[in-house]
Amino acid sequence: MHLDARELDNNTLIEGDLCIVGAGAAGISMALDWNKSGKKVILLEGGGFEYDNEIQDLYSGKSTGQRYYPLRSCRLHLFGGTTGHWGGMCAPLDPIDFKIRSWVPDSGWPITLDDLVPFYTKAQDLFELDAYNYDLQYWQKKYPGLTPFPLDKNIIWSKMWQFSPPTRFGKTYKETIVKSANIHLYTYANLTNIVANNEVNGIKELIIKNHEGKTHKVRAKNFVLACGAIQNARMLLASRGVAKKGIGNDRDLVGRYFMEHLEIKSAQLWLKKPFSTELYTFDYGTRKPRAELTLTEGIQEENRILNGSASLTPLIIAKQQTPLIDVWSNEDPRKSFDNLVANFRKSREKNQAWKDDSGNRAFELFTRMEQAPNRNSRIMLSDEKDALGVPRPQLHWELTELDKYSIRKMYHILGEQMGKASVGRIKLEEFLWDENDNAMPDQLGGGWHHMGTTRMSEDRNKGVVDENCKVHGIDNLFIAGSGCFSTAGAPNPTLTLVALSLRLSDYLKAS
């Protein structure tokens, strides 16, 4: 069922069993999991079914510290959320990502990879992916040409990725949501305040508004914030009616530990002789699985570095591509997305030689590295308010010495192993030459992957939510999405955040 909140009588009271705030990947996945459950599910979306520039402006904010993309264009504010322009890259986290690592401050999740596996399997279906199998041997049976470099498997392994079409949740699942008898989708219903009881151990109601001047209240047994890592933290911090520091922020942790993936051109690989790199290069035509080069858990521990991976792009293409941080610079997400597509297209159309895989001897190595958890990397509130009266977010993105050290060390190890195996040689990009230089260059980008800010921990002194994504100390408030990540891991977060949301959904059904 669909209702436009702009058309309701002012001060309408909306009531249900479960209220999910945000209709992106996390929110829609949870709502679908409750379809035909017999429970009344309220799904709130701040935008509509199409892009609205006025609605999009509610995501505007400022940033300091390490250079970052415009906050206004990092996320899409409409039904389906940012799945409207995501690339479809999917891979699960690794076992090491969940462990306490002595060399990684504040590492460790209160759950393990095994706890998420059943929900990864369910998430695969939502993203229209093949079987939940990320083993190289499995895919080699389907694609015999997927040959890995002859490297020491105890040091370097080939981590597999699958590619969603990519599934646009706003289009693929719109009909199911709208026609559902028990899911009540409200569009143009922007959350502006979370109202807690006097003891701040439960949520009484939510206040939602829109640009037409309508204000409504929402009451439910349980509430789930699924607005993304930045907006979830923003709303918790801004809701100070009873909790003067913000909801769930009595330990000053809401908004802290903002994480991104560190993405940057880092090195060049020059092969000694031609070698088929079908396994490591992305085929835009078939979108078949590919691998990225990753260091094993033991090597990460031995060298005290973060988890990261390196992907290959023919150098003839890479040299024509502008760094993503410079491409995605427009406040309008549609224009930034068009610039991104044009950036990739021009390099491939201009250099057709990349299609001859056997002739490629030189490749760019592109890094995707997890960011070390850092409490000073955070979301705060600015003095400026949006059109609905909510303080705008301010991002301070701050990195540490471990971040750059890990990138440099990963390529030192990779270069050494390429040489030992007589595969080729690696040339580092200039920003990695000086081992005493811990600063990141301006061309460093992120994956538009917002993680942390409401991190998971058993200890409320170290995290905002517990192992079931419940806000510590509040009986009926939960967080869905990558804001709950304790550490970032190397893969894109979308598959994992949906798996984590489906795990939360199971918990709520049993409660």
Image: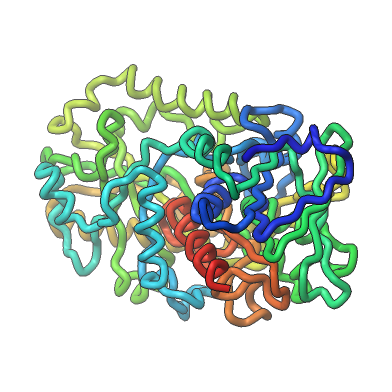
Looking at this view, name the residue that lies furthest to the top: 350
Judge whether 363 appears above or below 316 on screen.
below
Which of the 4 image quadrants contains residue 200? bottom right
Q: In this view, does 420 lie to the left or right of 26?
A: left
Q: Position of residue 323 (x, y in %)?
A: 49, 35
Which of the 4 image quadrants contains residue 472? bottom right
Q: Can residue 65 be seen in this view?
A: no
Of the pair 390 and 295, the residue shown nearer to us: 390
Of the pair 462 and 153, the residue shown nearer to us: 462
Q: In this view, does 309 lie to the left or right of 453?
A: left
Q: Position of residue 245 (x, y in %)?
A: 84, 68
Of the pair 139 and 421, the residue shown nearer to us: 139
- Total numbered circles: 0
Q: Can residue 9 be seen in this view?
A: yes
Q: Position of residue 315 (x, y in %)?
A: 30, 33
| Residue at screen point 77% across, 76% down | 201
Q: In this view, does 45 lie to the left or right of 288?
A: right
